[in-house]
């Protein structure tokens, strides 16, 4: 019952104010995606290190 109430309150606030602030690891996932794309473009062993960093960013979440 409490969960339904909370969900309805969130929905109500979202309808009243449609702007949202992303959270819950959104910035880390965005950075990990960008770093992974860089790893694909980087040749050699450096790409392995860059991909490992992207993986580490995903693990933070």
Image (tube, rainbow, N blue to C red):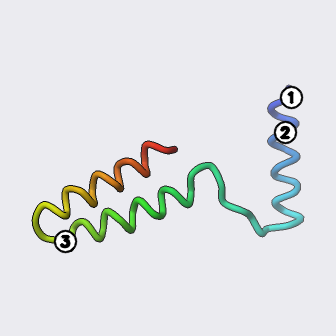
Foreground label between 2 and 3: 3
Q: According to the image, label 3 marks what residue?
A: 42
Q: CA distance from mark 2 to mark 1?
A: 6 Å
On residue 24, the disc is none
Q: Position of residue 1 (x, y in %)?
A: 85, 26
- 21 relative to 42, above or below: above
Q: Is residue 36 left or right of residue 4?
A: left
Q: Viewer-proximal residue, 40 or 5?
A: 40
Q: CA distance from mark 2 to mark 3?
A: 46 Å
On residue 2, the disc is 1
Residue at image point 88% right, 36% down: 5
Residue at image point 19% right, 63% down: 47
Q: Quadrant of residue 35?
A: bottom left
Q: Earlier in the sequence, mark 1 or mark 3?
A: 1
**Badges 2 and 1: C-beta atoms under 8 Å apart?**
yes
Q: Viewer-proximal residue, 46 or 34?
A: 46
Q: CA distance from mark 1 to mark 3?
A: 50 Å
Q: Is residue 18 left or right of residue 54?
A: right
Q: Viewer-proximal residue, 49 or 3?
A: 49
Q: Earlier in the sequence, mark 2 or mark 3?
A: 2
- 20 relative to 3, above or below: below
Q: Few, some or many C-alpha atoms within 10 Å of disc 1 (few <14, some 14-19, many ≥20)?
A: few
Disc 3 element: loop
- 29 relative to 58, above or below: below
Residue at image point 89% right, 64% down: 16
Q: Few, some or many C-alpha atoms within 10 Å of disc 3 (few <14, some 14-19, many ≥20)?
A: some
Q: Position of residue 36 (x, y in %)?
A: 31, 62
Foreground label between 1 and 3: 3
Q: Position of residue 6 (x, y in %)?
A: 84, 39
Q: According to the image, label 2 marks what residue?
A: 6
Kindly give the residue lying farthest to the top in the view shown.
1
Q: Position of residue 44 (x, y in %)?
A: 10, 65
């Amino acid at each position: 019952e409490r969960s339904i109430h909370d969900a309805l309150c969130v929905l109500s606030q979202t309808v009243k104010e449609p702007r949202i602030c992303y959270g819950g690891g959104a910035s880390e996932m965005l950075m990990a995606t960008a770093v992974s794309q860089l790893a694909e473009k980087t040749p050699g062993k450096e790409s392995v290190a860059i991909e490992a960093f992207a993986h580490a960013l995903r693990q933070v979440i």
